Amino acid sequence: MSLATNVPHRPAHVPDRACGLRRLWVCVLLALGGLAACSALNPVTLARMALLDPLTVPPGDVAVRLDLPEGLQVGPGDGVLEVTVARKSTGETIAERFELVQSETLWALAPQDAARLSALQDRARSWPEEDREGTLSLAISGCSAGGGPAPGAVINVDVSFDAGRSFAPLIRDLPASDVIGMAEAGPDSGEGAGCLNP
């Protein structure tokens, strides 16, 4: 599944046509099946995210916390942050992929990747605001394990923009049964059995 949320950033003091990269603040992807469960998204958190500027948020402050039921697993290297910025007048594009490091249920950028993202932000901010557009995305992929999650199991996702000191609920009570269809359609055995990838 791919669960995607595009949140436009539209500050009142900036004309809509000039919002540039901030028009698409963040696309949060959870690759665990095939349905975009919009009803599970928290509208208050989405509104807060829309007020953030991805070119000024410190990279080290971005974190995702997953609450997965038994029977769903996320392994090393399965958390990724991707940033794409384009300069409209020249067609120049910056596209970078950063691995998120897991600490228990928390996923955040490694220090060296946070430095790389900071350099990308600096470069993008050197372009005229009205001449840039792009996206920042957080992606998690995972695998079903054993017999998969129990009936009634749910998935929850929280986001933090202060290095994990506080979290806001992004996805609440998403039925795990809604997101395992792709795993069931995958290989029955062997390496990659039941794996769910973006």
Image: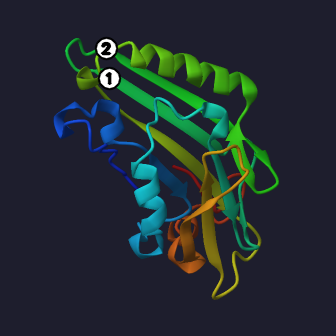
Residue 4 at least partly seen: no
Residue lying farthest to the front in this orientation:
13
The three-letter amino acid code for the residue at tag 2 is: Glu
Where residue 84 sits, quadrant-wise, is: top left
Give the labeled residue for mark 2.
Answer: 92
Please name whichever residue, 136 or 127, is drawn nearer the observer in this view of the structure.
127
Residue type highlighted by circle 1 = Ala
Which image quadrant is residue 149 in? bottom right
Neighbour tally class for label 2: few under 14, some 14-19, many 20 plus, Cα within 10 Å: few
Vertical order, 25 against 113 (above or below):
below
Q: Is residue 75 left or right of residue 99?
A: right
72 left or right of 2 in image: right
Residue at 46% over, 51% down: 49
* Label 1 crowd (10 A; few <14 / some 14-19 / many >=20): many
Name the residue nearer the viewer: 60 or 83.
60
Query: Compared to 43, does 60 lie above or below?
Result: above
Q: Which mark is residue 38?
A: none
Q: Residue at x 65, y 56 (%)?
A: 142
Pointer 1 and pointer 2: residues touching (CB < 8 Å)?
A: yes
Question: How far, Cα to Cα, is label 1 from label 2?
Answer: 6 Å
Horizontal and vertical percent for residue 63?
65, 46
Q: Position of residue 97 (x, y in %)?
A: 55, 29
How many numbered dots are placed on residues in this image?
A: 2
Q: Residue at x 22, y 20 (%)?
A: 88
Q: Position of residue 193 (x, y in %)?
A: 67, 59
Q: Secondary structure at mark 2?
A: loop
Find numbered disc 1 in the image and state the secondary structure of the residue it sits on. Answer: strand
Viewer-proximal residue among 36 and 41: 41
Q: Reply above or below: 65 against 185.
A: above
- The residue pinned by badge 1 equals 86
